[in-house]
Amino acid sequence: MDELQKEDFEDLGNISQVLAGRKEAFAPIIARYEKLMFKIAYNFLGKNAELEDAVQDIFLETYKSLPNFKLGKRFLPWLYSIALNVLRKRYRKVLKIRKIQTTLEQLEQPEPVHPYELVERNAMQHQIRQAVHSLPANLKEIVVLFYMEDLKINEICAILNIGNENVKSRLFRARKKLKNLLTNVQLNFKNGQQ
């Protein structure tokens, strides 16, 4: 059994009440984790008009799935796993929209933007986010959870239901891919190819 803390017991009490028919007992859970879910949604989806809807979907899916929650376990890793499932679906939708928007923008602006203007407009943080978003889903999840959500390896194991070595391996592969992606971005800027 996972090591439970004070917040875990409060969550378990609220969940027990919800399962007993007191729907209003879910409100403290939302209040406790809403900011955290907005943070992970932002880190996963980027600046997006659908962030609020995504967070609502996370809590709706959590509420519907409460009968499947094992009361002796920690709630937060379980909530993260539901959040990731919801965000994966939303991210696929966002990718389709971005692809359409990019196509439309290319049609509207046939002339390429000067490389120095790109460098000025896009800070390194933007480049890092783009690199993270271009990673395969399984590596992107690890990067978001470890670096952007500041979760520990064992917490990520619980959320993704994978072993410690698997998490470390994915982190290693993600770092390597990010290093290559970001090195290429810097080289392209220096060579005037972006």
Image: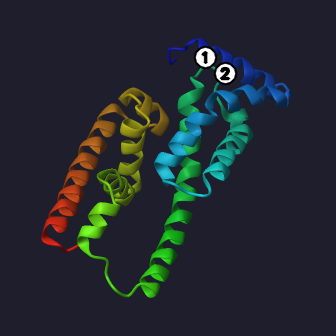
- What residue is drawn where x is 39% and y is 57%? 133
Q: Quadrant of the C terminus?
A: bottom left
Q: Is residue 169 rendered to the left or right of residue 79?
A: left
Residue designated by label 2: 11
Q: Nearer the viewer, residue 189 or 134?
A: 189
Quick check: 73 above or below 169? above
Residue 181 lies, in percent from the top left, at 23, 59
Amino acid, disc 1? Glu
Q: Nearer the viewer, residue 144 or 109?
A: 109
Q: Is residue 5 rendered to the left or right of residue 26?
A: left
SS for callout 2: helix
The number of callouts visible is: 2
Q: Is residue 29 rendered to the left or right of residue 94?
A: right
Q: Which mark is residue 7?
A: 1
- What residue is drawn where x is 65% and y is 49%? 52
SS for callout 1: helix
Distance between mark 2 and mark 1 Cα atoms: 6 Å
Q: Which mark is residue 28?
A: none
Residue 85 lies, in percent from the top left, at 56, 48
Amino acid, disc 2? Asp
- What residue is drawn where x is 45% and y is 87%? 107
The answer to the question of whether label 2 and label 1 lie on touching residues, with beta carbons closer than 8 A, is yes
Which image quarter: residue 187?
bottom left
Residue 101 lies, in percent from the top left, at 50, 75
Residue 165 lies, in percent from the top left, at 29, 35
Q: Residue furthest toward the right? A: 21
- What residue is drawn where x is 85% and y is 26%? 22
Quick check: 108 above or below 58? below
**Coloring scheme of the render?**
rainbow
Residue neighbourhood size for the residue with mark 2, other residues' Cα within 10 Å, grouped as few (<14), some (14–19), many (≥20): many
Residue neighbourhood size for the residue with mark 1, other residues' Cα within 10 Å, grouped as few (<14), some (14–19), many (≥20): few
